[in-house]
Image (cartoon, rainbow, N blue to C red):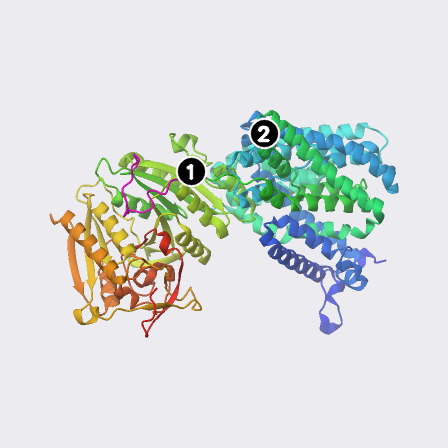
Amino acid sequence: MVNITSIKTSSNGIWQGDSPLDYAFPLLILQTILVVVLTRFIAFLLKPLRQPKVIAEILGGILLGPSAFGRNKQYFNNVFPTWSIPILESVASIGLLFFLFLVGLELDLSSIRRTGRHAIAIAAAGISLPFLSAIGVASILRSSISATHKVGFGQFVVFMGVALSITAFPVLARILAELKLLTTRVGETAMAAAAFNDVVAWILLALAVALAGSGTHESPLVSLWVLLSGVAFVLFMMVVVRPLMSRVARRCSPEHDTIHEPYICLVLVGVMASGFVTDFIGIHSIFGAFIFGLTIPKGEFADRLMERIEDFVSGLLLPLYFASSGLKTDVAKIRGAEAWGLLALVISTACAGKVIGTFVVAMMCRIPARESITLGVLMNTKGLVELIVLNIGKEKKVLNDEVFAIMVLMALFTTFITTPTVMAIYKPARSNSAQTHRRLQSSSPTSDNTKDELRILACLHGPGNVPSLINLIESARSTNKLGRVKLYIMHLMELSERSSSIAMFQRARQNGFPSFVVGRRIGRTSNLGNDLRDRVAVSFQAYGQLARVSVRPTTAVSPLSNMHVDICHVAEDKRVTMIILPFHKQWRKGGESGDDLEEENVGHAWRGVNQRVMKEAPCSVGLLVDRGYGSGFQSQTPGSTQRVCFLFFGGPDDREALELASRMAEHPAVKVNVVRFVRKEELERNDIQLRPAPNKCREKSYSFSTATMNRDPQKEKELDEETISEFQKKWEDGTIDYKQKTSSNIIEQVLTIGRSGEHDLIVVGKGRFPSTMVAELAERQAEHAELGPIGDALASSNRRIVSSVLVIQQHDIAHVDDVPVSKNENNSSEV
């Protein structure tokens, strides 16, 4: 036994004979490192199985406890000695307190009020049937496990009922996002039902704690006083504190770039004070933190609070709570066939109650059988709230070691099977739209009524991309009445494990495969959450009304690893002609003079999104390198002119760019220049041939099409000549300035054009099926290989280029596969 009063905080160091493991603070540091590293490693291993992070954290805690590593008594007594557990649990409880505050911030009560009757009925069935099933399970457990009979039957039943009936709202949201189901009927119904379930679960938990607390008192009035005090606390928070927090939120409006420190301190103190009051009443302190989170209005203030708190809490403190739970979980306590049979009984009862209850009510609501069973599986998702219930039950001595281990394994199993089961039984159908309007330069005329309609999907990372995209769309907008433009705007947001991602989804409601708001004003009815504050949506709505362009906004909230799936799906579903992507780097004017270009980089992961879209897109793609393209151009201002230069070398991508030039030339405020590069006659006879070099690094080498073409290079040249001839004939009135340059050093001439400042935008083809001139550049060292040789040269950050650049890639199924190449000196095969 260790006298806790003799434990010191810090040691004098190993050189003075002190072992850090005998002192509270260095031991806590070591425990924290072990927990975080192990849970992150397990999360990495489970990532291919698409499991939520909570699974890794539960497993990590169990592994560190007596079930696995703790079997080594020397390790367990040194790293997790008995005297250190209260310290670890105290720190973990602080993390839990603030995590429940974040859960309250996530949960939007107004969304529950808007929930349809079907979702409420499904949630009610998913709670009531498992709760009733818990009566039978509790009876069997009490008769089979000796220590449980010491606990009051009512307390035991309530804790078991809450544990079996819970649905983990945050975990479910991330599973649905990962499976792209959030905007399907199944996903929306499950989210609404889970939100309702969450609120009911907390009420039931408060009831369970109140009953458990009365177990040590003879008078049953104690529970009544606890419940009445809890109701009074909730009323006080909603009637008095909530208006005060609304005033604080208004003072921290979006117009302010920062939140003043006193307001942050006020919130942090409020969380701790609320927790203290509910603990003083006799309800667990986490209930107070949760209610305080509900009092803060959803919006900019709540978002910034999450950003300030969540990383430290969810990344460092919360895993300690799972570790402390794992230290209490000893799988070895489940001994013999009877004990494992009880585990199977609990798991089957939990699954059957949720799935059957949800399935029956969903069928009564006329939801198809396959969707109904999927809803049942999704509503069976457990998570942190389950562990909180179990830990409180163990703390109140309602659950003994064996029952606690059984219930933890049940929560782990039911959550683990959710994703693979849903993937097996429910695969939402995708539309198979007709293969039309896939590129600007259509190979054959179409017969439908959208023949002359240009459909564009413009993607952006934030408000900083808005001016350049509006400028580009306006430049491409034909003034011909038949040349209509339909613009789909997709605001790309990363879905992470952070709480703010789920809050962002609740406001956006456009996750999974994004849906579009049709025929209504954005400021009133779109699902962009806090609509009037969404500058992206408002900006494009204003542009659409001024330019008479049909605008459909949406928000895609996805992990960056599969963000391209959202983009390509929408492009296919809406029969988009071209996708416009923002380059992962952007340059803005700044510096002391105000004329220097300062680079902003959104991250290498976004570059990967662009690369995957360009590889898998069902239509043509434009990648926009912005150097202030949106500044100062207003189509409504008389005399304002946009100067756009098209560089033509030959090949399908360049011919697609020339088609865009023809469209832009129709706009009265756009001045189009076309520069065609040709080789000198003595060089023209020496065709450059390329051979595949798949071993080359794709990040540092340009890739070209591996397709076996039915036409030879000579045929490509003929198509180039034919396209140029038709283009010149169409614009022989001099509207377009057409020049032809002969050069043996095209890179230097291209850079000269980019540095001149004579053009606001330079448009080039990527060159996947290259002309002879572009093929000569195949072995140049690439900085941004996805742009092709010419686009890469113009997008380089150290070339002093001042013009923005648009790189065009024409959609062609034959060109989908590409590899790095080398020049073939033997002229044996051509790529």
- Circle 2 sits in a helix, a strand or a loop, which is it? helix
**For residue 449, above or below residue 68:** above
Range covered by the magenta-colored residues: 431-450
Q: Tell me the crowding category of disc 1: few under 14, some 14 to 19, or many 20 or more residues within 10 angstroms, Cα based.
A: some
- For mark 1, what is the residue? 533
Is 590 on the left or on the right of 8, as rendered? left
Give the residue drawn at x 73%, y 51%: 326
Secondary structure mostly seen in the magenta stretch: loop
Question: In this orientation, does residue 335 appear?
Answer: yes
Q: Residue 484, image x and y in percent?
A: 27, 37
Numbered tag placed on residue 4 in the rendering: none
Amino acid at circle 2: Ala
Which one is earlier in the sequence, the residue at label 1 or at label 2? 2
Amino acid at circle 1: Arg
- For mark 2, what is the residue? 119
Nearer-the-camera pick, 413 or 450: 450
